[in-house]
Image (cartoon, rainbow, N blue to C red):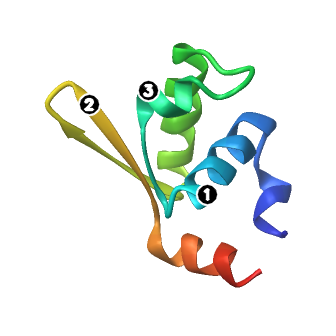
Amino acid sequence: DMLFLFLNSDEKSIIHHLVQNNGNAGQADIARLPNMSRVRAFRSLQKMQSKNLIDITAHGKVRKITLKENIFNMLIKE
């Protein structure tokens, strides 16, 4: 709950999506979330990476988003 106080609505929906998918998702999947565009997804993911919440790794043309393990474990316990 404390974590969500510091996130905007886009970041909250991304975190929720990642938790539902065992902490992993493609950037294209995140861009398809409701009220999300490719640009909004990209900017939100960049902010989240700078906040050290996620890791972004490139696999060819696909960008894989992974929720940090300590964050994922904390959210699963709640």
In the figure, residue 72 lies in which quadrant? bottom right
- Please name the amino acid that badge 2 sits on: Val
For label 3, the residue is: 28
Q: Position of residue 22 (x, y in %)?
A: 50, 64
Secondary element type, mark 2: strand
> Amino acid under label 3?
Ala
Where's residue 30, x and y in %?
54, 33
The amino acid type of the residue labelled 1 equals: Gln
Do the residues under discs 2 and 3 have CB atoms within 8 angstroms? yes
CB contact under 8 Å: marks 1 and 2: no
Give me the residue at 83% from left, 69% from top. Answer: 2
**Which residue corresponds to the image point at 52% horizontal and 37% vertical from the top-left?**
45
Q: Give the number of the disc on residue 62.
A: 2
Label 1 and label 2: CA atoms lie apart by: 20 Å
Q: Name the mark on residue 20.
A: 1
Label 2 – label 3 distance at C-alpha: 8 Å
Measured along the vertical axis of the image, is residue 34 above or below residue 3?
A: above
Mark earlier in primary sequence (1, 3): 1
* Helix, strand or loop under label 1: helix
Q: Quadrant of residue 9?
A: top right
Question: Which one is earlier in the sequence, the residue at label 2 or at label 3?
Answer: 3
Image quarter where the C terminus lies is bottom right
Placement of 17 over or under 35, stated as above or below: below
Dot 3 alpha-carbon crowd within 10 angstroms: few under 14, some 14 to 19, many 20 or more: some
